[in-house]
Image: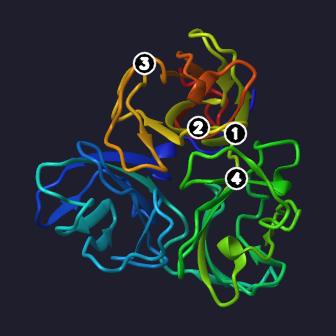
Amino acid sequence: MAYTTIDKPTDYFNTVLFTGNGGSQTITGVGFQADFIWFKERSSAGEHKLNNSVLGTNNYLISNSTSGDDTTGSGIQSYNSDGYAISNASNINDSGETYVTWNWLAGGSTASSNSNGSITSSVSANTTAGFSIVSYTGTGSNATVGHGLGSAPDMYIIKRRSATEHWQVYHSGNTSAPQTDYLQLSTNEATVDDVVRWNDTAPTSSVFSVGTHASVNGSSSTYIAYCFHNVKGYSKFGSYTGNGNADGTFIYTGFAVSWLMMKRTDSAGEWLIYDNKRDAFNLRDTRLEAQDNFADSTGTTKVFDFLSNGFKCKGSDTDINASGSNYIYMAFAESPFVSSGGIPTT
């Protein structure tokens, strides 16, 4: 039984709920100065707006869109030690609307130059939490990009900022040869077999590889990448096979889950997102979809139990638990199953 390396996961990832006021307000309760903030309006349809401190305030990308940088509106005014100040902005702080933000700590807003790859990148990395934000400019030729994690990433999500393209996803659990396949965060499409995105090359402890496709490496185009690797007791990027039953598959993570995003890979399926704040108790059925602007949805077939050491499918919908079908997930912890001192936490 592996001990955790992080006893307090909320020092590195946290979910916060708030209600918009249509003016200015300060959001607190994050627990740290977030470097990656994912906003989603819950009570109405609205864009997923993703911001990071490397690119700075009022610079967003939208997970349910192929568009590039959105710098047209107001939004985040400042990053604070326990959250951020926001102003009136559509899908950020509309009056009377409810919101969720998912917040990650990287290495701070000052990115460091990384020359490990053939492309020099700018990196804000948190090696303890296995998360980095990587900014780079494409060359149009097969290349490598330094990610700053010190371990091979299990998942990275890349978006072309300077032009229209889908979000590209590498996930180590996608297939037996994930370097030959990709998913797109901005669509519900199944895994696509393609050697061009990742140049048929798995990531290493220092770099990830990109091929010549414009979505990841167009000449002179700018990109942002969010890179993650497994950290015992804190994060898990894995896969599972559905059984088609309401009493579904159990997936061991080694921690009590606070946040889960998952997707079917062998057929079309939504990028479903659950957390422990919108649903404080089991069953967890309140969900959002990264590829769509829908408001919170609930139901009885796309549901999970969050357990002390993993999560369990409790529905038979094909988006989460079709018999014999393949799924990938990324999960973050509420608390580890075993502390760094070897003491069970539950």
Label 1 and label 2: CA atoms lie apart by 7 Å
Nearest to the eye among marks 2 and 4: give it: 2
Q: Which mark is residue 265?
A: 1
Judge the density around disc 1: few (<14), some (14-19), many (≥20) Cα neighbours within 10 Å.
many
Q: Residues within 10 Å of mark 3 (few under 14, many from 20)?
A: some
For disc 3, the marked residue is: 283
Image depth: mark 4 or mark 1 in front? 1
**CA distance for labels 2 and 4:** 23 Å
Image vertical order of residue 246 relative to residue 190, above or below: above
Question: Can residue 124 be seen in the rendering of this structure?
Answer: no
Q: For mark 1, give the secondary structure.
A: loop
Give the CA distance from mark 3 to mark 4: 28 Å
Label disc, if present, on residue 269 of the rendered structure: 2
- Location of residue 228 by image quarter: bottom right
Q: Earlier in the sequence, mark 3 or mark 1?
A: 1
Q: Is disc 3 in contact with disc 4, using a CB cutoff of under 8 Å?
A: no
Of callouts 3 and 4, which one flags the residue occurring earlier in the amino acid sequence?
Answer: 4
Judged left or right of residue 168, residue 195 is: right
Answer with mark 2 or mark 4, whichever residue precedes in sequence: 4
Q: Residue at x 65, y 21 (%)?
A: 322
Q: Which mark is residue 229?
A: 4
Q: Is residue 277 above or below residue 17?
A: above
In front of the other: 76 or 249: 249
Q: Amino acid at mark 3?
A: Leu
User: Do tag 3 and tag 1 residues touch (Cβ < 8 Å)?
Assistant: no
Q: In the rendered view, does 241 fall on the left or right side of 21?
A: right
Q: Is 334 drawn above or below residue 34 in the view shown? A: above
Three-letter code for the amino acid on which mark 4 is drawn:
His
Label 3 or label 4, whichever lies nearer to me, is 3
